[in-house]
Image: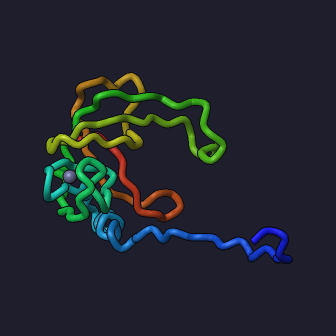
Amino acid sequence: MSGMPSIKSREIKIVQEIPISKTLRFWEGLKEGKVYATKCTKCGKQYFPPVADCPNCLNSEIEWIELSNEAEVETFTHVVFRPTSFCQYKPYTVAIGRLKEGVKVLTWLTGFKLSEIKVGMKVKLVAKLSQEGNPTYEFVPL
Ligand SMILES: [Zn+2]
């Protein structure tokens, strides 16, 4: 009722916990040198990076598929002016590679001279540890 003396309650925050357990296999896989994507058991759509729920059909049942590591460069960019968070790195190249399984992966492309990189060339997707020791993945020469 209006006019009643009242106090404001404390603001209540709702924190959504992201279920890391659902994508834990991905991070564990990287540590073992394996790169996993997820596949929806209902509509068959494949996702990389893995998702716990299918955005296409909202199904929560996914299966893990280990990627073959064989990729073809679809496009790439050489980054000279780095965002602040990447300033400690030398200029780098990022590429989108299409894997044999059909999923596309965006990540660093290393081990090539810039002049050697061509659209359509075959590269290998490998799991590795970043300079900070975190599991990550990148494209390297075959
Ligand atoms: Zn689906």
Is residue 33 or residue 40 the one in the foreground? 40
Indicate left or right for 26 with 85 as reference: left
Q: Nearer the viewer, residue 107 or 142?
A: 107
Q: Say whether residue 110 is visible.
A: no
Residue 65 location (% of width, % of height): 17, 58
Question: Which image quarter holds the N terminus?
Answer: bottom right
Count of marks placed on residues: 0
Residue drawn at x 37%, y 41% is 106
Q: Is residue 138 above or below residue 123?
A: below
Judging depth in this view, the residue of 40 and 84 nearest the camera is 40
Residue 123: x and y, percent? Answer: 25, 38
Q: Residue at x 27, y 55 (%)?
A: 58
> Would residue 7 be found to the left or right of residue 95 on screen?
right
Q: Is residue 116 visible?
A: yes
Q: Position of residue 53 (x, y in %)?
A: 29, 59
Q: Position of residue 21 (x, y in %)?
A: 36, 74
Which quadrant of the rendered structure holds the C terminus? top left
Identify the residue at horizontal 63%, vertical 70% (top origin): 13
Give the left or right position of residue 96, taking residue 10 as reference: left
What's the coloring here?
A: rainbow
In the picture, measured across the screen, residue 5 lies left or right of residue 57, that is right
Vertical relation: 28 (above or below) 81: below
The residue shown at (83%, 75%) is 4
